[in-house]
Each structure stands twice: as C-alpha cells, then as structure tokens.
Amino acid sequence: MKLAYAKLSIYLALLLASPATLAIEITLANGEWPPILGEKLPGYGYGSQIVSRAFALQGITVNYEFMPWRRALEETRGGRFHGTLLWTSTPERRTDFYYSLPVYRSQTVLFYHRQQPVSWRDPESLRHSRVGMSNGYFYGPRWRSLQQQQWFQVDQANNDAQSLAKLYAGRIAAFPCEEVVCDYLIGTTLPPQARFSLLYDPNPVHSENLHLLISKKIPQGDWLVKQFDRGLQRMRQTGELTRLLAQAKLQR
C-alpha cells in the first residue's frame, strides 16, 4: 500500500461515514513468529486473529503484508503501513508510534535437555555451560547481567529453530525462548522424540507485554489505536479473548 493511499483511505472514511456506519480497511505489516503470527497459519496466527477481531468489532477490516521484522518496523514508521504487530515498548519506538493496550504477554522460559537438567531458579546450574541465544533477542535484565559476567558461554544462532536443533543434539545445555513459540517449533521442526527429550523450567526468564503499533505518520492514527483498544476491551469483557487464547493453547 502506498503512503498516499494509506492516508486517503482513513481520511475519506472519516469524512463520508457516520460513526454508526464507519467501515474502512487498513493494512498492517506482519512477521513470522508461529504460532502467534505467520502467513501460512490459520487466521495468520492467533495474535493476528486477536488484532483482526478487535478491529472488526469497530467496523474496521484488516489486511496483512508479511515481511522481515526490521522492514515491517521501518516501513510502518515511515507511514507505508497503518501499523505493525506485535512489539515491545521502548522509548525510541514511542516517538514514532501510537501504542495499543497489551495484546499478548510473552513469557520466555529456559529450555533444556532431559539428560542435562538445569534450573533458572538456580543460575549456578548454568555456570560455565554453553547456552543458545538467537540474534536480536532481548532476554531480560537478569539474563543480560549473567551474560556480561560471562557466567556461561554463548552460542549464537540466527533463529529459535536453529538453537532448538542444537539443544536436541546436545550441542548446547540450555536455551531461553518464548514458551509457546518454542513449544510449537519442537512439534513442527524436530523429530517426535524431541517432545519427550526437551523440557523447560516454568520460572520465567523474562516476561513482557506485546502491542500493536500504529504509525504517527498516518492521519488519525491516534483515533485508529483508540478504536483497536475499544475492540480489545470488548473482547475481554465478553470473554472472547480468553476463549480464543484457550483454543490456541489446545491446538499447540
């Protein structure tokens, strides 16, 4: 979608439609993070389903374009897309984007091999171990502190699937990963035995809210994020959000 068209679509809708009949289309930049987000997933993943439904309750139809994460953020920042999902809050981003209410709370946990148990509650179990990390990920202040102390050796990978494969093969001792994401990857990228072999410590390594971002370059962007927030609140009040997340969990 061109910037001019993105601006025009909202501007004309606001001029021509009354609040009761308002119906517009927007385009959001999306990325691959299954089962939460993904171009080939049903409904584009349950994170996308939440966003689409919240907007739909306010008469707004969502289209998605999938692309690398960095490009999604930068092109939305420039106004090519109305918004992008799902992102953590940083002071830098808040300069360029309107933030929605939290859509999903991500929880990172420590995965390990059954034959070599470790515990996040007891970091001593990680001392001098070789642990996996994915490029570009932030695992929280406590993890960063241990990393800076060289408490463990870091084995860097391009993505979570690579680190899980290393963990299954015994090449690393542990790997912090978003719980539902790695649970999904274990079931879809590794042999069936991996379900038995790879476990995780339920004590969170890091937990944070994820949000929909709306570009401040889009006219009425503040209005658009308010519409989303209202739809999301309606989903919470009716129990629809809880039901959708519960269903997604059963499908993992």
Image (cartoon, helix red, strand yellow):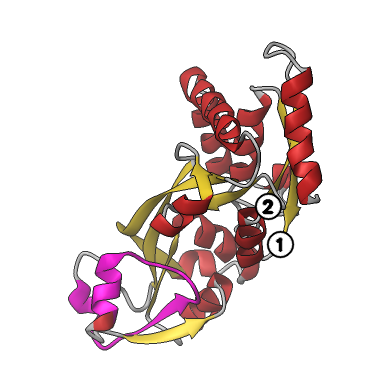
**Along the polypeptide, which appears first: circle 1 or circle 2?**
2
Residue 132, position as x, y percentages in the image: 43, 79
Mark yes or no: residue 51 visible.
yes
Residue tagged by mark 2? 29
Q: Residue at x 53, y 37 (%)?
A: 245
Check residue 156 in the rendering and tell me which mark sits there, or answer none: none
Residue 76, position as x, y percentages in the image: 64, 54
Residue 65, position as x, y percentages in the image: 75, 52
User: CB under 8 Å between callouts 1 and 2?
Assistant: yes
Q: Going by the image, does 66 lie left or right of 132?
A: right
Mark yes or no: residue 170 visible.
no
Looking at the image, which is closer to me, 161 or 100? 100
Please say whether residue 125 is one of the residues in the magenta stretch: yes
Q: Residue at x 38, y 51 (%)?
A: 208
Figure check: 136 above or below 9:
below
Q: Which residues are magenta?
A: 123-147
Q: Secondary structure at mark 1?
A: loop
